[in-house]
Structure formats: C-alpha cells, structure tokens
Image: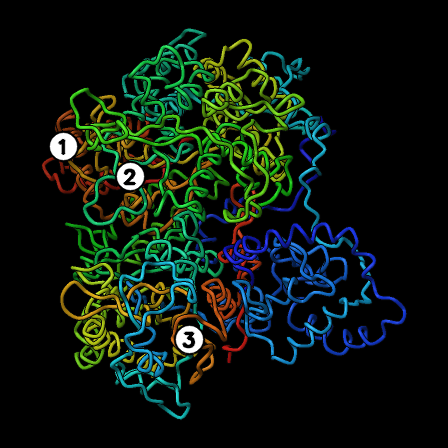
Amino acid sequence: MSPDPRGPRRPLTRRQMLGRTGAGFGLLGLAGALESAGLLAPTAAHGAAAHGVGLGGMHHPAKAKRVIFLFMNGAPSHVDTFDPKPALARYSGETPSADEFKLERKLKGGTFMPSPFRFRPHGESGVVMSDLFPHLSHFADDLCVLRGMHTDTPNHEPGLLLMHSGHQQPTRPSLGSWLSYGLGSENANLPPFVVLCPGLPVVGPQLWSSAFLPGEHQGMSVNTSDLDVHKMIAHLKHSKLDRAEQRKQLDLIQQMNDLHRSSRPHESALDAQISSLELAFQMQTEAGEAFDLSREPDRLRETYGRTTFGQSCLLARRLVERDVRVVQVYYVDGQNKQPWDTHSANDRGHRRLCADADRATAALLGDLKARGLLEDTLVIWGGEFGRTPYSEPAKKGDPGRDHHHTGFSMFLAGGGVKGGYTHGATDEFGMNAIEGRMHVHDLHATALHLLGIDHERLTYRYSGRDFRLTDVYGSVIQDIIA
Amino acid sequence: MSLAPESVGRWSGRRITTAATLAIVLGLAPQARPAADDADGLALFEAKIRPVLIEQCYSCHSAEHDAAKGGLRLDTHAAMLQGGDGGPAVEPGDPELSLLIEAIRYDSYVQMPPSKKLAPEVIAAFEQWVAMGAPDPRDADGPAAPEPSAEGIDWEAARSSWTYQPPQRSEPPEVSDPSWVRSPIDAFILARLDDAGLAPNPEADRRTLARRLSIDLIGLPPDPLEVEAFVADPSPNAVEDYVDRLLASPHFGERWARVWLDLARYAEDQAHIVGDDTSLTYPNAYLYRDWLIAALNDDLPYDTFIRRQLAADLIEPADADELAALGFIGLGPKYYRRNSPEVMAEEWEDRVDVVSRGLLGLTVACARCHDHKYDPISTEDYYALAGVFASTVMFNQPLTDECELDKDGGAKAPEEAVHIIKDAEPKDLNVFIRGNVEQKGPVARRHFLTVLSDGEPTPLGDETSSGRLDLAEAIADPSNPLTSRVVVNRIWGQLFGRSIVGTPSNFGILGEKPTHPELLDDLAARFVTEGNWSLKTLIRELATSSTYRQSSAITDTHRAIDPENTLYARASRKRLVVESWRDSVLSASGTLDRTVGGPSIDPSDPEIGRRTLYSRISRLELHPMLARFDFPDPNAHSDGRARTTTPLQKLFVLNSPFVTHHADRLADRLATEAGDDTQARIDLAYRLLYARPPSEAETQLALSFLGSDSCDDHDRWAVYAQALLASNEFLLID
C-alpha cells in the first residue's frame, strides 16, 4: 500500500468544478467557468460579452461566435456543384479502373459521367460554381469553397457520425456539444445548441448527442415539419394557465422554495433550482418569440423560399441573432431522410434540390450580411461525403451517382474564413483530393480554431482518458483563414 | 491531416516483407553514419533535406513538437532508421526501398506531406540523398522514437500498489465517542472526523429518515401511514426494522436494477435502425431487466450474479430462465456494417469496456491502441480479453419450441426471442498495432489481466471454449482485489451521495484516490468473507449506520473545514434521479401501478402508472423526458448520473401534459381523501409529498393562495398541487 492513498491536495478537477458551479456552468461554458475561477488567462478581447466568452475565445481570440451548419443529407455531388471536371466529357462512357482508384464500393457498371451543368466564375474573386446556384453565385466573394475534402468511409451512417462527432460509432459528443461545452451560451434564455430538422435525418439524435459530456450540451432538436411555434417546442406553454396566472403559480412555488431554503442554509443547489425555474419562465417568452416565424415580413419569408429548408434557414438566422451558439439545419424532407442521395436521376435530383437549397442559402447569407452577423457567424455547407464522378446505372430511367468519399466539396462562409477563395483540388476526374486535402478532422480543427478553441486542448476526461473532438487527428488549415 | 489509420495499415501491409528485411539491416545501421569525407552528402543534407524536414515534417514527426504520428519521428538520424509503425523510414543507399521516398512520391496510400506533394526537384534531392547513404549529422539526442513498452511494465511493482492488493480487514480505530459507533463504518468515519476537529451531525428526525431510507432503498416515497408508524415506534431497533421492511419489499429490486442497467448500458434496440427494420430491436429485452429485479430481490450473491450475467449458458445445469441474464453482453451495441473487421474491433471494445469498467473499475479499453499510459494494462492484455468476446456471438435465443428458426438456430422474429450470447468458434486475436485492424501484431492468447493474475496471466478458454466462464470466475474470485471494492464503492455512492473512490469506474492512477481506503477495504473484505457477497447485508449495514442517519444540516464549521463533505460529518442532500422523481409524482397522485416486471412503457404517457424503470430504452432515440433529466446515453457504460439543472427540465415541470395531468389527479385525491376541509387537504398533501405535516407558515401560504373557501374549485387546487410537485422540497432528499 502506498503511504497515503489519498494523495496530496489537488487542484479542482473539471468534474468538481462542474459540481460546484452548478447551473452557472452550463450558461458560461467551460471557458467562462475557468475564467471565473481564475484558471484561464483573460485574452485581449475579453469583455466583449456579458455571459459567455464572446470573441475572447477560449485559447486564443476568436473570429466566429456562432456556427450554422447547413447539412445536405445524403451527400451532394461535387462534380455537379463546386468542382468542375471538363475531363469527364473526354472520358465519358469509360470505366474507371477499380485498381487505379482503389474503389471501395462496387462499380455496378458505372462509367465516367460528365456534369450537364455549366460552370462559370462569379464575383470579383471568380469563385466557380455550376449554374445550379443562380442566387448563391451573387455571394461568390463570401464563399470559401473546399474542393479537397475527404473522409474515411463511403457509407452514410459512419460518414454522418464522423462528420458530426469525429468518430464513426455513436459514442462521441457532436461538434455542437463540444462548442456548447467549451463556450457555453450567451443567451441564458435559449439553449446553446439547436437542431432544426423535419422529422429525423438518418442516424438521428446521435448526430447531436452530448455522449459523455453533461446532458445539457446535447442539441435541442426541433421538428420543423410543422412550423407552428408550439408544435416545434414542447412544453412551452401551460395548457390552462395564462402568463399572469402562471406567474402567480410561480410566485407560490418560489415562496415555498424560500421557506424550504430558509431552514437549509448554505445549500447552493437550491439557488440553482430556483434560478433555473425563473429562467424557464422567461424562456417561454424568449423561445416563443425566437421560433415564431410569423414575426418575419412576408417578403423576407418569400426570399428564403416557402419550403421547410428555406424557412428553417430563416429560423437559424433568428436563433443566431439571439446568440444561440450552434444551429444545425438538416436538408431532409418528410418522405426522404437523405434526399441528396441521388443513386438514380442524379441530374434531376440536383436540379430540384439545388433550386431550394440555393435560394435558401443565398437568402441566409444575404440576411446575415445585412445584419452584420456574417462576419462572426461561421456558415458550413455540405454533406457527409460527395458523389462519384462516374455513373450508377439505374434499373430504369436516368443514371445516378454513388457515394464518394476520397474527394468532395463543401463550402464555408463568414466567421473569419477567406471569402472568394477556393481551397484544394481533386484530380482531373474528381476522384481523389490531391491538393489542399482536408479531412473531416481538419474541418473540425479549423472550425474550433475559428471559435477561439485549440482542438487539442478542448478535452474531457472520461473513461480514464482525455477525449477530444478530433481524437488524435486534425490540423488547422491556416490557408483558408482570413 | 496526417497518417489516417487506414493509411498506416496499407503502408505496412504492402511493405511488410521489406520492413522485415530492413529490420535485419537495422543492426548494421551505425555503419551508415556519415564518414568524415562524406562532405557532399552532408552538404546536400544541409541545403536540401534538413530545411524540408523542418518545414514540412517536424510538426507531426519530431520531439520538439511532441509528435510522432504513425510512431515516426524524423528529427534524428536514428529515429529515421528506426522508423514508425510501417518500419524504417529510410533504407540508406536504396531510395526504392525507402518508405519515406515512397510517401513523398505520393506513390502509395501514405502521401506525405499530406497538405501538398513536394516539388519534383525536392523529391529528386531526397532520392539522391538516400542513394548517397542518407548521411545525417544530427545527433540522436533523446530516445529515437516513443519506445514500444510491451515489456516495459514492471508487473511485480504494479501488483504491489493498493489497487491490486486484496482488500485488508482493519481493526476499527479508537474514537472519541464509542457510543456513536453502530458498525465498524462509524468508527472509521468518526476517527477521521476526530482528526479534523469535526463532530458528526445529530441523527436526522424520523420523518426525514423515513423519506431518505425509502427513496434510497426502494426508490419510492414512503406511505404517510408507514411514516407515522415509524415515528411512533418506541423500539430501539426502529430504524433497523424499518430498513428490514424496505429490504424485503419487491420494490427493492426495481430500485437497484436500474443502477445496474446504467452500468450495463442496457437498451432495447440499436443506434442505427433504418426505416421499418425491426431486426435490431429487442422486444423481450425486458426479460434481462426482470431477471435483475428478481436476482436483487432474492439477494443472489454478487459473485453468482456476475457469473450468470457473463456465462449462464456455460454453467451446469443450464437453466432456461437464467439465460436472460446474458443480456448483460447480449443487449450491447451492434454497430453499423458489423462483421467488417474494424467494426467488430469497436464492438469488442464495448464488451471489454463494460466488463472492465463496470465490474473491475479499470479502463482496459484505453489499452486498445497502445499500452495503458498510466495503469499496468498492456495492449496484449486488451486483446487477450477481447479474444473472449471475439469468441462469443450475439443471437436470438428462441423463447418457445414453436418459433421459426434461422439457419443458425436462432429465432427469426425478435418478438419470439431473447437476445443473448453464445460461444462461437473460439479464437485468439492478433494485437492490432495502434488499434489498426490492418496491422496485425503477435497473437494474444486469451487470458485474464496480467496484473490481476498470479505470476503468469490466468488463461481464459481454450480450443473449445470462449473463456467467458473462466473470465466470470476470475472476476468473481474472492481473491480478486477489485471486484468487491468496486461494487461496495458503487453502493456506498448510491446511499451517501458520493462514493469513497470518486471515480467509481476507474480505480486506476487517473481515478480519484479513496477518501477512506481502510474503510473501503474493510467493507469489501467483510462483504466477501462475512457477508458471502450479500448485497442486502451490505446495504443494511450502510443504511443503519450512525453515519447514514446524520442530519443534512450544513454548519459554518462544515463550510470552513469540509465544504465538500468528504469526511461525512453530515448527510449530503441528494436530488431525486428521474426514476424516483417520476415515481414520486405517480405515488403522490395515487396512480402508481405497483406491478413488478413486464414489457416496457412510454414514461411520459400521463395514463401510464408503471414505474419509470420500465421505460423503453432506445439507443436510437433516448426518450426525450429521460434525456432531459440526466438519464445516461445507453450507447456506453455509465459510471454515474450527471446532475444538471436546466430551464428545459423546468419547462417540463411547468407545462408538460404529464405533470399537469398528475397535478389534476393529486387535486382529485386530496378532495377524495381529505374531503371538504381545506386544511386537511393541505396537511395530506404535505404528508404525501414530503412525508411531514405543513408548518404554520406553509399552511398560511397555501390558504392565501387557495382562499379559505376553495374546496369546489378543482382548477385552483390543481394549480396548487402542481406547485407542490414543482417545489424544491419534492426534488431534494434531506
């Protein structure tokens, strides 16, 4: 037996800190809690925000305060959107060599298939995109297109999990949960991490799970199938009491709590419960307002498009405007959990989907810009991987494109990334990322960096070791940072 | 992006022969050191090689950056020759055999540097330099690479530390007030309080104790009549008798089964069910839950409890009803694209994790990719244990003889089966180097953890058996130093609000140290020898101790000397977990259904009065009410409940149909049972919810809210009833 198994007095563990700071921790985030405990050196921009860490950042000054992740479920085709491959016309009809390209999925008789869409440079920067984006092209100078993306698997479920949590199994916290944990919320009346989706995407709630992080950091998922406020948020309103009556009931509860507390001095947990109840009451109004799209002018609603995705993008703006830290918007529809999964009729599918996504995304960027929010809001657009530059023949009708993970495109906007910039490249076929290669871990590392977090230092001790979003991987891609 | 795991594998996979050859060459490596007249080569190194290495490689492959991705460092000559996971990076004199050259040419899956291929002239310079014998003036300062420490664990030293020594009995220490000592527990606690200059709090009043004991032991609030009987009981053994009644209650097993279900990451489906596919749902998973309830109610000795959950099918005589116990492993997660090697490796990790953290308090899964950084657990140990689970399969055990079978003898329809495990083809796994399934190291013969074995590791299984039963025996062996400590510590934590080892699933170096090591050891040793592994005996001793009976009042002295209450000079206030909270609501409103066992339910359905324990637990989508109130993610072992306080919880309390419905029922009940007497109703409400009568101030508060003549105003009473349910006193246990 060692001399004294109790060991020397140690500094507070994070877990103890969590226990001590109670409700305050969730609202302040780790950075705020550490700062208030004097464990985090204040940074230059400190003081920008009342509750959270604002642009002070956790480890270095942040360029972004919030994130909107527009997720195109099923995976959009890079060679039809942001990565023109004229060579595909030359090789059209030829079978890609399974060996040369080390294909992981069966070829199913596919041959190289050129995109039918016309690519043109846009804006002063000349960022190139296909004519599927007539609206978004006006924001070319705001986009940072990533053409060198790659991921580890061409399958939806592990691909989705990797893109959300940096791991292929459903056992790790999501990006949004890490950000909530690290940075907390700057609006005590709204949850820090909100997920907007009509129904559920493939995989489902594991995509916004807090896993082993405290439960308060999981995304609050909102079913946008019906955009009525009370359909979207459960328990926002008492079934019988109006606000004044409920206030009286609340006063009664708090008077009872006061009596209870008066005979239990020094029990800080009681104060946390009392203030949390008060917050809930406030949130009824605040959330009711934040989620109420009817408060937006009709013309703006039309600009976003009267579709679920369009209106969800508008909702995302209302939420980040109120300092919700992370909003994830899923492009899913009632019938299809992954509409971008165009195994057949790829071209028609992309025409239809882009018509909606283009309008909504452009409206969102324009709206954020007009309100001065784009500069410190990081917008991420993309899917879990890309689609094959070769065809997947359909049993009948037009061919589609299969899953493709060794090279694909995403784009970022705002939040401190270079606008009007294209980073990375795939080979002449659009098969493999060859330049400016950016793995999902790199995307995560870079996103955290933009929010003032060193991805190697935002860790959580669980099961005997320190976990982080990027596991043992990930590099910050400095080239894309403005 | 650096070396992705798959890349490492492909590299070595393709070049394994080369790597082996080069390993032989390694012995000659010193001869390749630069000679004095090697000026041209050294000049080339300084001009063309060193700057590129520093600029392009060191950030991931140098001691300076504390990075050796893929096990490779490139900052010393020796490190380059030693190489990384794939073997030596450089073969002096032969660029075509040098992995470094292959990588920078982007010829293979390993493409370095990952950001961009080097310019052709730079690659040519590297080729020329290697061809010249790779002359390199850099001194081998420091270790060449992170040394593989497979043989690096000093097992004897490791076994001598507290964690791996069997728990020892200790003579209870002398204390200032021997009359306070009801059990050895109290002596250990009081001795430390004496040292710290603290006195224990007085015993809590009977009403407080009644509620505390009832919630702690059976998870339900006490009946007001029971409380009165307990308060009036003049017997010196009143507490002991009250505890015995609770231990004998059929609800005891319900309360404690849930503690085990957290640990066992119990769920009734998988995280990746798509569409209407039901093959990954387990409609009869509840049979495992019900097995636990019965086992705990019957006080099945803990060693047997473990044996059956790991190996009921291998214990003679096999009892069909006991097979449900195998849900411990059988209901574990299955991942998407299972049967592919990398996915099965993940599943084995889950099994190793739930067994090692859950039963042994060791984080063995940390050793999957490298030897445990802190604890004496080697990668070989990990794969030796994982082999047991690689030799075990999950399947649908038919519940009747009639049901339709698949080709493996399992039931076709999940509705007709219980999902358990059985032995598969026994096999030993290769160690996967750095956890990479494509990079196989030596075979790890199945065996128990070396540090917990005497001398040579205890073998598990053989050519004909998985080794599950051997594993169960090794864990349930009375000489296992951890099994008893870990379970005693967990139960202590449930009753006292914090456990003696604050990290109940990690007794390793990174876990917290025990606050009372002698106490934990003495309890653990007696649990096995005197208690014969009886959980009820253990719980009885804890719950009747003077330590447990203290009041929860916090004084200035407590705050000054022991604010965290690590010395137990008072009882710690506890919050109801979601199960007890919802069950208490049902109990108050008179709608609690006390049936024990049975199929699962939706806990937020206001019409369902079954206990919360019976909630359907989904890995795919955890019930939102449970998730909101800190229920753990059932995708992995949980070492304890988080305690969050969030506005979303309060919104549920203020507005959910569940709470408003039961507030209505509570108002009905008060009217029915207390009649048209406002004060009698208020009195009953306080007894039902808080196990005490209201104070004068509380009665006045209620009267001023309700009005003196409100008995016919049901809605008003419902609002009041909801306020009582939403109050802090309802949620907290003194």
Q: Quadrant of the C terminus of chain B?
A: top left
Q: Residue furthest top?
A: B235
User: In this image, A394 relative to A479: left or right?
Assistant: left
Residue A243 occupies which quadrant of the picture? bottom left
Q: For mark 2, what is the residue?
A: B269
In the rendered structure, the residue with mark 1 lies on which chain?
B
Q: CA distance from mark 1 to mark 2?
A: 38 Å
Label 1: element kind: helix
Establish if A133 lies above or below B576. below
Inspect this view and state whether residue B717 appears.
no
Residue B171 occupies which quadrant of the picture? top right
Residue A354 numbered tag = none
User: In this image, B252 relative to A424: left or right?
Assistant: left
Pointer 3 local density, CA inside 10 Å: few below 14, some 14–19, many at least 20? many
Q: Earlier in the sequence, mark 1 or mark 2?
A: 2
Label 3: element kind: strand
The residue lying at 57 percent from left, 40 percent from top is B367
Q: Are marks 1 and 2 on the same chain?
A: yes
Which x, y percent locates residue A9? 68, 40
In the rendered structure, the residue with mark 2 lies on which chain?
B
Identity of the amino acid at label 1? Asp
Identity of the amino acid at label 2? Asp
Residue B556 occupies which quadrant of the picture? top right
Q: For mark 1, what is the residue?
A: B668
Q: CA distance from mark 3 to mark 1?
A: 65 Å
Q: For mark 3, what is the residue?
A: A147
Q: What's the coloring here?
A: rainbow
Q: Are marks 2 and 3 on the same chain?
A: no
Pick the front one: A236 or A416: A416
Instruction: Kindly report which numbered mark, 1 or 2, lies closer to the viewer in this rendering.
Output: 2
In the rendered structure, the residue with mark 3 lies on which chain?
A
